[in-house]
Image (cartoon, helix red, strand yellow):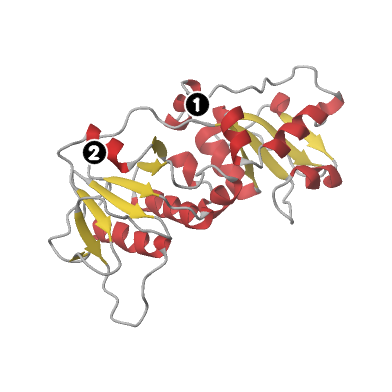
Amino acid sequence: MVAVRDCAFCARVRGSAYSSTYEPTTDLLPMNALTRRQGSLIRRLHDRRSRRKEGLFLVEGQRCCEEAFIHAGKAVEFVVLAEGFEAPRSISAERIHRCSVAEFATVSTTQNAQGILAVMRYAYASELPSPEPYTLILDGVGDPGNMGTILRTAWACGLRSVCVTDGSCDPYSPKTIRAGMGAQFSLTLFKLQSVAEWQTRFPDGRLWLTDPHEGARCMDAAFDPRGGALVIGGEAHGVGDLPGARVTIPMPGQAESLNVAQATTILLYETLRRGWLPGT
């Protein structure tokens, strides 16, 4: 049986600024069949605006659901299983609802549904962490695949938290969760209106801005984000005209730039190589 921890994610859920308009029903049909109201809710959660309004999001697929149940089990509102799918033992029976394979396909966000999804309550943490060893800020990262890959890399490197600005994609969208393989549930995520909000909170913290063409090389001693923030710009416009030091990744070939997730991976593992991250 998988143990469920009362993690930081669950603590944020209890103090969430989002007020959900959804209230779980206690009038369950026989054998906890999926209700029409629940199915309608799930389909609404395909849309970002509805997720924000309800304060809920979807997790789909066995691997991602396992990560959610292990690291954030208490944030699960309910689980939907297609007929024939084995029920997870870590989730209480009253939170599990079943439906036919055909009906599951109508609520799934994927073409090849795996037969399990969870509706979860989410929240961003309210207190920004001190930049120890440094803060990772994703500013305008708009592609869910890149966002998810970066979050999983951050988790793999040992970072405990990540800041995401308003101009970025939803880190709890179904595509982002699949790309991150559920890394969201092991990280503490903070929402920033802009990078300036972080600067106001930590005026002495230095910003290191990623740049494909100029700045200190990432392997040089001059690059040292400790006590400050490493800012990853969006795919289209980068970090813009933000003030701060610039860091670049050498590209002796003819490529104009690297994919944002690739570049972030290189930078994070450089800080890991230098022994700046926990556990190194």
- Quadrant including the N terminus: top right
**Residue drawn where x is 43% and y is 52% of the image:** 141
Q: Residues within 10 Å of mark 1 (few under 14, many from 20)?
A: many
**Residue drawn where x is 13% and y is 62% of the image:** 221
Looking at the image, residue 158 lies above or below residue 262:
above
Q: Nearer the viewer, mark 1 or mark 2?
A: 2
Q: Amino acid at mark 2?
A: Gln
Quarter residue 32 falls in: top right
Q: How many numbered marks are there?
A: 2
**Residue drawn where x is 46% and y is 21% of the image:** 15
Secondary structure category for the residue under label 2 = helix
Q: Earlier in the sequence, mark 1 or mark 2?
A: 1
**Residue drawn where x is 51% and y is 51% of the image:** 180
In-front residue for pair 251/183 = 251
Q: Is residue 114 left or right of residue 169?
A: right
- List x then y, in percent, for residue 196: 28, 39
Quarter residue 198 falls in: top left
Q: Which residue is mark 1?
A: 13
In-front residue for pair 250/213 = 213
Looking at the image, residue 156 lies above or below residue 85:
below
- List x then y, in percent, for residue 145: 52, 57
Quarter residue 218 falls in: bottom left
**Marker disc for residue 199:** 2
Q: Amino acid at mark 1?
A: Val
Secondary structure category for the residue under label 1 = helix
Q: Is residue 14 left or right of residue 212?
A: right
Q: Residues within 10 Å of mark 2 (few under 14, many from 20)?
A: some
